[in-house]
Amino acid sequence: MPLFDHIANRSLAHIVRFNARPQHFHENVATHSFYVAYTTALLCQLLKNRKYEMDSEKAITMALVHDMDEIFSGDILSPFKHHSKEVNDAIRRVNRASIKEVFRDLPPRLARHYERLWNEESESKTLEAQIVKMADRLTLLAKCGEEIEGGNEFFREIYDRVYKKLQEDTLSWWEQIKKEVIG
């Protein structure tokens, strides 16, 4: 199977995020992943300016694939996903199994590479993975802000919760750039 078959799969462009909330500005998973990757690049640069060592290319690539499992699952509603530890664990198990399917049509070496990046991001242990998680939150905040600016108060609760999490997060690297990023 040629690599182009994988490239031609544009499923993430058709999976609408926040599908249970009224939206003025619909966002799909592909658009979200772009903004997470771009925000990851910005955070990496801020940290490099402060002499942090990280693999920016790895982090940006990780950001690009961080939601690839949604090709199979769609955008699972957060209240359901985080309803209980059992539900969250079950979703993680299914995602870990399905991610192999996402990359199955790539050459084996490439498939393993992207699976490893996806798994690393989901574990959030490395600096690169933590940066992607933070970029994911920041882009969620931006999406909510966009909706609120457009008069959609359905996103206010999420905005307030995410902003509070960002303010309270005490990762040492985040403490170094937090004020510069969110004020």
Image (tube, rainbow, N blue to C red):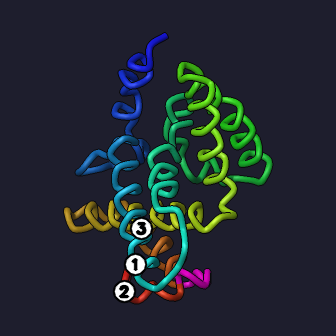
The earlier-in-sequence mark between 1 and 3 is 1
**Which residue, given by chain and number where applicable, does mark 1 sit on?**
46
Tell me the magenta residue range.
168-174
Residue 79 drawn in magenta: no
Position of residue 36 in the picture relative to residue 82 (left or right): left
* Dot 3 and dot 2 residues touching (CB under 8 Å): no
Which of the labelled discs sits on residue 137, or is there none?
none
Look at 40% across and 82% down and name the residue there. 49
The residue wearing badge 2 is 180
Which amino acid, by three-letter code, is at mark 3? Answer: Leu
Residue 41 against residue 53 in the figure, above or below? above
- Image quarter for residue 29? top left
Residue for point 44% across, 20% down? 3
SS label for mark 1 = helix
**Tag in front: 2 or 1:** 1
Describe the element under mark 3 as helix, strand or loop: helix
Mark 1 to mark 3: distance in Å?
Answer: 15 Å
Q: Work out whether 146 lies above or below 46.
A: above
| Residue that badge 3 annotates | 138
The answer to whether residue 154 is above or below residue 9 is below
- Number of the front mark, 3 or 2: 2
- What residue lies at 49% left-to-right and 83% top-to-bottom? 51
Q: Amino acid at mark 2?
A: Glu
Q: Residues within 10 Å of mark 2 (few under 14, many from 20)?
A: few
Residue 54 sits in which quadrant?
Answer: bottom right
Q: Position of residue 75 (x, y in %)?
A: 49, 41
| Percent of width and height locating residue 182 | 38, 82
Quadrant, the C terminus: bottom left
